[in-house]
Amino acid sequence: MSYEPDLPEDLDAFWAETCETARMAPLDFRRSLSNDFDLPGFLVETIEFRGVEGRSLSGWLAYPQGARRMPGFVWVPPYGRESLLPNAYGVREGFVSLSFNFFGHGAFHQEKYEPRRGYFSQGAESPETWIFRTMFQNAFIACRVLEAQTEVDEDRIGAMGMSQGAGISIWLGAFCPIVRAVCADMPFLSAIQSLLRHGVYRYPLKELSDFAERIPLGLERVLHTVSYFDTVNIATRCRRPTQVSLGLKDPAVRPENARAVHAALPATKSLVEYPGGHDWDPAMVANNRTWLIEYLVTS
């Protein structure tokens, strides 16, 4: 089944206003100036910064000893309330990386997903109030924070993540001028409008269809909201070099939906296929580093 972009008429105006709010938010951050996580080859500091609504957000900054004006990337978390740890997927040799917790938890907070702790439906009655608008804005601010670090070359910054992190990385590639290259592994909210119309039976996405059943004109309102965030739609605006991956057995981001994201990208792009499901693949480490080197280091 193929899927074509279905864009709302005011998509660009919506995202221009969304980004302007994040761009104008005060840049307020503090670093621990201590090595807070044992990771061979890297120093890992905790970092705190103010989000778009003034809330304190915690994360970590990983960099090689003596780093100055190196390429870097924001490592965007997948769905859930836990923090990504600085591990082989969240750092790369020769790069500085920053990740943070979207919900104000600690930089290394661990929490398994439970539907009762889900947030897919929060504010989903309109695109202006959906939680993913604020989350994107905070990811935009995280890019500004990374850009401000002396270890980082402000002209060589990328965005990378898996699932939710992959989708938001593509959104950053489309609308955040700081981001110059993207690696998006199994990007979420791909062809989301089509999925909702045909029925959703797996959590966490089922949180959204459950919500639609509880409010008047629920499906129509939710479809309107997600049309502004559908990663296929936003991919049409992403002109940064972007590598997309899919899992051939992925039940969460179906291969055809990831292919639709790749097809919608108008500029330099690559599609990588992994044999497994919706999960990390060890080959992502080298594949994504190679992509970032090509477009942040050698280009």
Image (tube, helix red, strand yellow):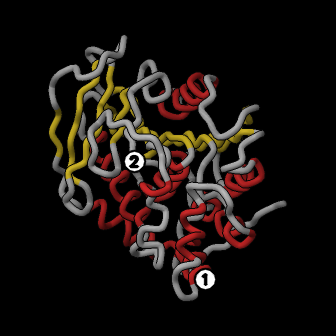
| Label 1–label 2 contact, CB within 8 A | no
Q: Give whichever of 104, 191 is nearer the camera.
A: 104
Instruction: Please indicate whether residue 264 sits to the left or right of residue 111 in the image.
Output: right
Q: Give whichever of 140, 220 is nearer the camera.
A: 220
Note whether residue 283 is visible: yes
Q: What type is the residue that disc 2 sits on?
A: Arg
Q: What type is the residue that disc 1 sits on?
A: Glu
Instruction: Please indicate whether residue 117 sits to the left or right of residue 293 in the image.
Output: left
Q: Earlier in the sequence, mark 1 or mark 2?
A: 2
Note whether residue 157 is visible: no
- The residue most toward the right is 1
Residue at (35% x, 59% y) in the render: 137
**Residue 1 occupies which quadrant of the picture?**
bottom right
Numbered-mark total = 2
Q: Position of residue 132 (x, y in %)?
A: 44, 62
Q: In this view, does 34 lie above or below 50?
A: above
- The residue most toward the bottom is 216
- Residue at the disc numbered 1: 220
Few, some or many residues within 10 Å of mark 1 (<14, 14–19, 20+)? few
Q: Give whichever of 18, 204 is nearer the camera.
A: 204
Mark seen at residue 81: 2
Judging from the image, what secondary structure is the residue with disc 1 in? Answer: helix
